[in-house]
Structure formats: C-alpha cells, structure tokens
C-alpha cells in the first residue's frame, strides 16, 4: 500500500494544492519588516517583562515547549514563563480534550482563574505579551507573525486528517482565529478558519490580521479582567 504524504492527505476537496503548502517570499519579507519597525518598542517592553518575571517568581524567565509546526515538524516554541516552575499540565490536557470532543467555545483554562499562574501572570497572558519571545522563532523561520497557532504534540495526536490542514503553513503569533472570536468559537470552527487561511493566505490578508490583532488583544484583556473580579 502506498503511503500518503501530508501534502496529499490534508485537503478536504481531494486536491493536493502543493503550492499552498509552500511559504511565499512575501511572508518572510513581511515578518522581518514588521519586527524591525516594532523593535524600538518591543525591546524595552521585553526587557521590562523579563525583569518583572524574575522579581515576581523563582525560575527561568523563558519557557520552552515543543510544538508542531509547518508540515508537522517539531520545534521549541519560546514564551515568557507565566506559571510556576514544573506546573502540572494534566488539567490542561483534560480541558483541551473536552473542547475537542464537544461543541463548546474554545475558552482558555486561565480565563476562569488558574492557581498555577505566577503573580500578574494573568495580565501577561491576556495581553499576549507572553508570546513576545516567539519573535525569535519567527526570525529562525520556525514561525510567522500570522498563521495558525502552534499546537502541542498531545493536541496534534487528537487531530483528524482534516484538522491537519492547518500544518500546511507556518504557525503564527496571531491569526484569523485570534481576531475572529478567539474565545467564542468551537474547536471545529477554529479548524475551519485555520484551514481556510492556509488555502487563501495573502499579503493583504496578513496585513489585515496584524492590524486587527491589537483591538482583539484589548478585548481579550478586558474580558479576562471582568471574569477575575
């Protein structure tokens, strides 16, 4: 029996659409240009957050976690550590399994409060500042500014073949799902958005998503603050 490659099996319509799986040059150019333009703001902000984490919690500032990226390749995703060292991940795995197997909105576990968070960890997470170290992943070519979020291996193992369409492009720091109702859409709706982006990505679409990211983050931070009161 012939082994079907990811390039052949990920498309629901039966068309391999190999060209969609390739990373266009404009994407790399846009990533580098945006990072360079934002560097004067990002550098002091990153330094401030790093110092804050070091003061508020014992342990490393950067948290490394294996994620699944383009064409199902594994890489070490970087984040600012917002949880206590050696935090138990079993509850997150159970929470994720419930969301995948149901029609419930993809609400993050810490939206209801999480004892594993360090002081002000909720603020760093709700504003998306914990993702800033992933700019290094972008510079390495492991991620892009825009794309489906990089999932953890135990999540990827639960995917059906149609869900793996999202691995047809570089994972992103932000994406279509993040700016279109992140905590209000179901797992299947998120998968459809990610798959649609893979097939329809363009320079204009990436620019629109980037500009919509800041308002989306502000709304998410406000929602999380209301829930924690």
Image (cartoon, grey):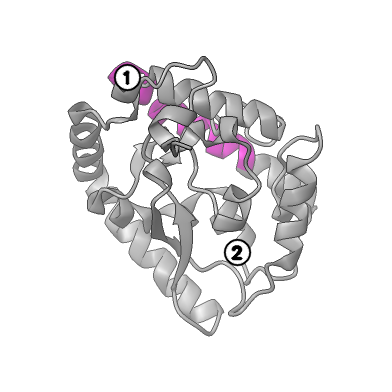
Residue under pointer 2: 121
Up-down relation of residue 26 to residue 40 (above or below): above
- Rendering coords of residue 96 (x, y %): 72, 50
Quadrant of the image occupied by residue 27: top left
Up-down relation of residue 22 to residue 226 (above or below): above
Up-down relation of residue 163 to residue 133 (above or below): above
Q: Residue at x 47, y 72 (%)?
A: 52
Q: Main secondary structure of the magenta part?
A: helix
Name the secondary structure under disc 2.
Answer: helix
Is residue 206 within the magenta segment?
Answer: yes
Judged by depth in the image, the label closer to the viewer, 2 or 1, is: 1
Q: Residue at x 81, y 37 (%)?
A: 102
Q: How many marks?
A: 2
- Rendering coords of residue 81 (x, y %): 51, 68
Q: Give the mark nearer the N terminus: 2 vs 1.
A: 2
Determine the residue located farthest toward the front in the rendered image.
1
Residue under pointer 1: 202
Q: Residue at x 58, y 48 (%)?
A: 156
Determine the residue located farthest toward the bottom in the rendered image.
58
Q: Measure the C-alpha gap from mark 2 to mark 1.
A: 34 Å
Q: Which residues are magenta?
A: 202-220
Observer-nearest of 119 and 209: 209
Give the left or right position of residue 198, taking residue 180 as reference: left
Quadrant of the image occupied by residue 2: top left
- Rendering coords of residue 160 (x, y %): 63, 37
Neighbor class of circle 1 (other Cα within 10 Å; few <14, some 14-19, many 20+) is: some
- In the picture, the disc for residue 184 is none
């Amino acid at each position: 029996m012939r082994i079907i490659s990811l390039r052949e099996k990920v498309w629901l319509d039966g068309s391999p659409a190999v060209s969609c799986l390739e990373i266009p040059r404009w994407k790399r150019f846009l990533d580098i240009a945006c990072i360079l333009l934002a560097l004067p703001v990002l550098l002091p902000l990153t330094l401030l957050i790093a110092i804050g984490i070091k003061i508020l919690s014992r342990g490393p500032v950067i948290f490394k976690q294996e994620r699944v990226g383009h064409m199902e390749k594994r890489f070490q995703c970087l984040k600012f550590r917002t949880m206590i060292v050696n935090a138990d991940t079993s509850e997150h795995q159970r929470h994720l399994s419930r969301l995948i197997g149901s029609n419930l909105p993809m609400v993050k576990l810490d939206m209801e409060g999480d004892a594993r968070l360090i002081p002000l960890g909720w603020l760093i997470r709700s504003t998306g500042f914990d993702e800033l170290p992933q700019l290094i992943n972008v510079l390495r070519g492991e991620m892009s500014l825009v794309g489906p979020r990089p999932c953890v291996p135990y999540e990827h193992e639960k995917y059906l073949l149609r869900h793996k369409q999202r691995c047809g492009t570089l994972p992103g720091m932000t994406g279509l799902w993040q700016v279109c109702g992140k905590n209000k859409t179901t797992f299947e709706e998120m998968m459809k958005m990610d798959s649609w982006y893979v097939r329809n990505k363009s320079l204009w679409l990436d620019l629109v998503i980037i500009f919509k990211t800041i308002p989306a983050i502000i709304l998410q931070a406000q929602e999380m603050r209301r829930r924690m009161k």
